[in-house]
Amino acid sequence: MKLDIHENKPIHITQPDLPPFGEFTASLKQIWGNKWLTNSGPFHQEFEQAIAKYLGVKYISVFSNGTLALVTALQALRITGEVITTPFSFVATTHSIWWNNIKPVFADIEPNYFNLDPGKVEAAITPQTTAIMPVHVYGNPCDVAKLQQIADTYGLKLIYDAAHAFGVKKDDNSILNHGDLAILSFHATKVFNTIEGGAIVCHNAKMKQRIDYLKNFGYAGENTIIAPGINAKMNELQAAYGLLQLKYVDGHIAKRKIISEKYRAQLGGMQGIRLLPDIKAVHHNYSYFPVLIDSRKFGKTRDEVYEELKKHNVFSRKYFYPLISQFPTYRGLPSATRGNLPIAEKVTKEVLCLPIYPALDLSSVDLICGIIRKSIS
């Protein structure tokens, strides 16, 4: 196997899936003809209906990006005080809380799939707590039953950051139907993308209407503003693009599964490498392929493997390092104190996400696994 950097094109952590160019130009012709670019145009309306049906949810409101969807979700539920969340996520999760002038409180994660530990969540509740914001990390579902029980017991709202969880089902039901709201990201790096984009899933028409008002400056009519809203609307080009993506996303997920299985076959028995097994009764989307590297057993640290891959033009990512709680913006919070989040602190030093996307050929997977094996030879 040749590992010469000069003989390999760069392999990035991900590559966006694009619809056929000719199909998108046909949509563009319609948009040019309509001369309706934003403000809930025909493609926007069709996309919301189509994606709700595909995902198996009752109501969905699409956004220009997932971060604005998170910010708006907290506004829609009128959250104040403190929100318990995870330190093991992309920074947008906590940023959305901070932007709403709410105090984020970090709780530790469980060691199997790196989602919020319900026991740690319950221990972090104070009289100021008003909501919990868990993340379905890497698309693996949180313990939704226990988290809902805690939310009900303490009268808290439950808002899921489901940025990684497009199309994920448990017991044949969408995990997006759990909690008061669930937020999706359609960023270019995600399983399903609209270039930029996002959405809020809710459970009744009244909440859907409030969310729609908030994402359009708070307008409830031509001359009526009902809240200090924001401009977070998805435009017609994104919506048209998203409609095309829906035609192909099942095939993309199927290819991701094949790549995931290839990685498992090659890395599964390797000393010092830990893989996250698929969860029984869960329909996964294979959005990420994380491995944990135990330096004592493997002989190399996660960072050394990361650098070795880079030498061969393979660009993995340390999702998620450092922890959000370790960034200067948040490390002064009492819940961010080192030692308070031992599982998250351990995982963030060991985790490495390997390249995975539908266009990644299996020979490249062989190459990546070969580099990892060779790094300890």
Image: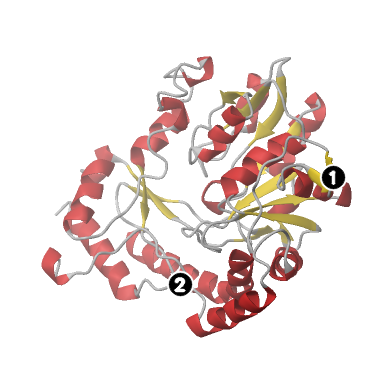
Q: Can you identify the residue that label 1 sits on? A: 223
Q: Is residue 188 above or below residue 203?
A: below
Residue at left offset 74%, top offset 43% = 214
Q: Amino acid at mark 2?
A: Ile
- For the C terminus, give its image quadrant: bottom left
Which image quadrant is residue 193 in? bottom right
Which image quadrant is residue 302 in? top left
**Within 10 angstroms of label 1, few (less than 14), some, or many (20 or more) residues?**
few
- For the N terminus, give its image quadrant: bottom left
Between circles 1 and 2, the one closer to the viewer is 1
Residue at left offset 21%, top offset 44% = 304
Image coordinates for residue 309, horizontal then vertical, percent: 22, 55
Q: Can you identify the residue that label 2 sits on? A: 258
Q: Earlier in the sequence, mark 1 or mark 2?
A: 1
Colouring convention used in this rendered image of the protein: secondary structure
Would residue 111 appear left or right of 240 to someone viewing this image?
left
Residue at left offset 34%, top offset 75% = 361
Q: Amino acid at mark 1?
A: Asn
Which image quadrant is residue 171 in? bottom right
Would residue 310 appear left or right of 248 to someone viewing this image?
left
Assess whether mark 2 and mark 1 are in contact (beta carbons under 8 angstroms): no
| Secondary structure under the numbered disc 2 in the rendered image | helix
| Secondary structure under the numbered disc 1 in the rendered image | loop
Q: Which mark is residue 74?
A: none
Q: Could you tell me how far apart the alpha carbons at marks 1 and 2 are, in whole angstroms?
A: 53 Å
Image coordinates for residue 59, horizontal then vertical, percent: 79, 56
Image coordinates for residue 94, horizontal then vertical, percent: 55, 33
Res 251 visible: yes
